[in-house]
Image (tube, helix red, strand yellow):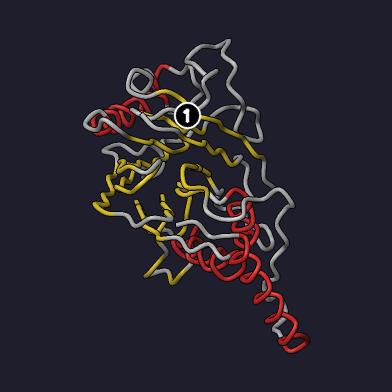
Amino acid sequence: MMLGRGTRLLAGAVAALCLLLIGPSAPRGAPVAEPLPADAATGFVPNRVLTWNICNPCNRSGQNLGRAMEIATYAPQVVGLQEACVRDVEKIRQYLENFYGLVYHVEYGSVLRNWGRCGGWPWRPGGFGQAILSAAPMTDRVTVEYPDGGSEDRGYMAVTTTVSGRSVRVFNTHLAQRRQEAVRAGQVGVLAAEVARHDRAIVLGDFNSVPDAAELSRMWPLAADADRQCRPSPVGACEPTTDWYSKFDYVFLRGIVPLARRVHPSPYSDHHLLYADLGAT
């Protein structure tokens, strides 16, 4: 599933040529891809997974192309997105392929249809919830809506794919908003019961909880944070993942060893990108 530097360069050259040929006849506001940083990945990084709450509504100019550029910079094999509208993810996926040569499979875990968040017609609003992008094919998708979503419907999705050269169950979730601790505790209970069924699992998501929050107490015995220094302690060395300096976003690993991780702030969301490079069991 690796794309070499030559393939990435060819994709960029084709995109640039198209823009050159279209020139002044291109419609006003047509997307123009920004070049990736010099240290960007040159193809899919097979053992890399990333979680990102892409923020909705944020309505920043060119946000989907910007989101694609951010993802392409790190080129993870698996991407878990939260607060994701199906239409936005389709655009992101298209930009990743057309501008950056990264062809992802996609599965959706929409838990509601919302015209205000995702557009569409009032009688046919867009799907809103989670999405997973994967360089490798995915199977056995499930979407589960939590019995109590709190102030908005919430849930998790799960797929089976290949990471670190082996089959693994990947979960992606978004828990209830802040100040709903009891609701989140119930949601974690539902999620943890399913995660416990798998010897190898990756749990991505926005948990809306700091590491020592009581509602996460059922996750920590099951899986470790990809950040080896992060523990459920008020004095733990957990790097913030939001613009308000809280750690709400996690890559929990069960039966998989973390090698490295990074948090990257982005102008396209109030949450940072969080990725982890994984080893074997």
Mark 1 residue element? strand
Residue 164, position in %: x, y? 40, 41
Q: Position of residue 272 (x, y in %)?
A: 61, 40
Q: How many numbered marks appear?
A: 1
Q: Residue at x 67, y 50 (%)?
A: 40
Q: Which residue is mark 1?
A: 258
Q: Is residue 109 above or below residue 245?
A: below
Query: Which image quadrant: the N terminus?
Result: bottom left
**Image quarter hosting the C terminus:** top left
Q: Nearer the viewer, residue 275 or 40?
A: 40
Camera sees residue 81: no
Q: Nearer the viewer, residue 65 or 103?
A: 103
Residue 173, how many percent across, how many down? 39, 40
Q: Residue 197: give x, y in percent of width and height.
A: 21, 31
Q: Residue at x 49, y 20 (%)?
A: 211
Q: Residue furthest right?
A: 24
- Answer left or right for 274 relative to 25: left
**Residue type at the position of mark 1:** Pro
- Give the image quarter of residue 101: bottom right
Horizontally, residue 48 falls left or right of residue 195, namely right
| Residue at the left extreme, as displayed | 197
The residue sitting at 47% across, 37% down in the picture is: 206
